Amino acid sequence: MKPQALGPGDFNLPDAFQKIGDETKKRGMKIIPWMEEDNRARPQIKGFDELYEVDLYGRRTSHHPGGPCLNNPYFRNLLVAQVEDFVRSYDVAGIQRGTERQGPLGNALGAWHHGGDPGHSDPGQTSCFCEYCEAKAAKQGIDFARVKKAYLALEPFVRDGRAGKRPRDGYFVEFWRILLRNPDLLVWEEFWSDSMRETQRLVSTTAKAARPGIPVGYHIWQNISFSPFYRAEQDYHTFMEYADFLKPATYDNPAGERMASFVDSVTQNVFGDLSHQQMLDFEYSVMDLKEKSYAELKGRPAPRFSSDYVYGETKRSVDGVAGSNTRITPGLGINVQEHNSTPESVRDCVEAIFRAGGSGLVLSTAYSAMGPENLSAVGATLRELKLA
Ligand SMILES: [Zn+2]
């Protein structure tokens, strides 16, 4: 990519920072920008597409669950430059990195909320199989050809499951058999997760080299509440080394709808032998949750998860980083996706976050959707708790 001046249609970051800063200074507020790498349209910058992951058939990905390849040296250069620019050029009090992606196994299975919706995941488009990942794998003694073969073996299992074709010995047995014969499925999943941790560490060290002591934190995708596979990968303990704060998305308000969609997705393959309610019961057991039934979650308006969920997820993350300086500042969901938050639900969740040991919270996600009565409930509760 070649540096170029801002064009008329481009987002003007310096100007935006100036406008935000003028207002926040008057109110004694600090700015901690959120740097996101996915879940939005790819920037229309010449050459940017070449940073993206490559799928199982050598095609360049263009959108979630694909994204910029974490092992592409040009992407890492861009990331370092962006972090340095934020820290050196603007009056920021910290940096928050946001990413809502997972590795190739989770992507191939559609193991995330809405992962099984038409067009959301394709086992043939899972990634990354680019030249940089291949070269890095070779250095670690990973057989790239065998990894590809493993994912090619998984592809028809997922496709057939979505078409309702039950394997002769059942979904779970067939999945385990594929895994036994192709353990590289797991090798490549962990390879991806390790690469994500490397880039996160890079964000932290880059920011702190540019300005020693600047707090750097990470958003945790809400898939950690739905997918046991993803939860296993996102061990809070591993963040202690480089994260000053973590923002797990503990959004109560869209959680019911999201959990139901996760159940819909994984009952199309690995857990296809279970009914929706059986799968949900399994989820509630292994994920340590207790919320409404599948039929209730499917009702409209979509029901929220309880504040017990927010308490439990906050407590789990606080316990996960115990003994470190990493602070937990959960994302409090207010009218995220579903417009079902109320001042009472918001109040209960704010209280739950602090009771569970959270040291702050992030009102999430869109200010324009939250509603003044819900925002007032946050303020009132913080004053009640003598935190503001
Ligand atoms: Zn790659």
Image (spheres, grey):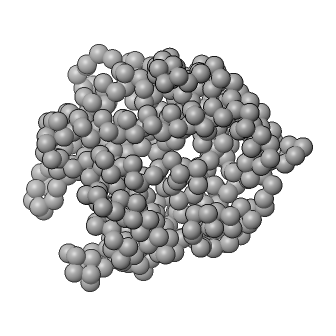
- Is residue 373 visible in the rendered image? The answer is no
Does 86 sit left or right of 130 as displayed?
left
Q: Where is residue 63 in the image (x, y as percent from the top left)?
A: 52, 33
Q: Whole-percent x and y of residue 42?
A: 44, 31
Instruction: Please give left or right for residue 249 compared with residue 354 in the image.
Output: right
| Quadrant of res 357 | bottom left
Image position of 310 with respect to 159: above or below: below
Viewer-closest of 195 and 123: 195
In terms of depth relative to the viewer, which is nearer, 193 or 59? Answer: 193
Instruction: Please state, as top left, top right, bottom left or bottom right, where the N terminus lies in the image.
Output: top left
Give the image location of residue 57, x and y in percent. 64, 21
**Hey, which quadrant is residue 168 in on the image?**
top right
Q: Is residue 366 left or right of residue 281?
A: left
Q: Residue at x 13, y 40 (%)?
A: 211
Residue 374, percent across and down?
A: 37, 72
Q: Which residue is drawn at 70% across and 55% down?
A: 264
Number of on-image labels = 0
Identify which residue, 177 or 224, lies in the foreground.
177
Indicate whether 97 appears above or below 199.
below
Q: Is residue 73 visible?
A: yes
Residue, far right: 168
Residue furthest front as drawn: 141
Identify the residue shown where x is 61% and y is 63%: 286
The image quadrant where one finds the C terminus is bottom left
Q: Which of 292 and 379 is in front in this view?
A: 292
Residue at image location 48% in from the left, 39% down from the top: 193
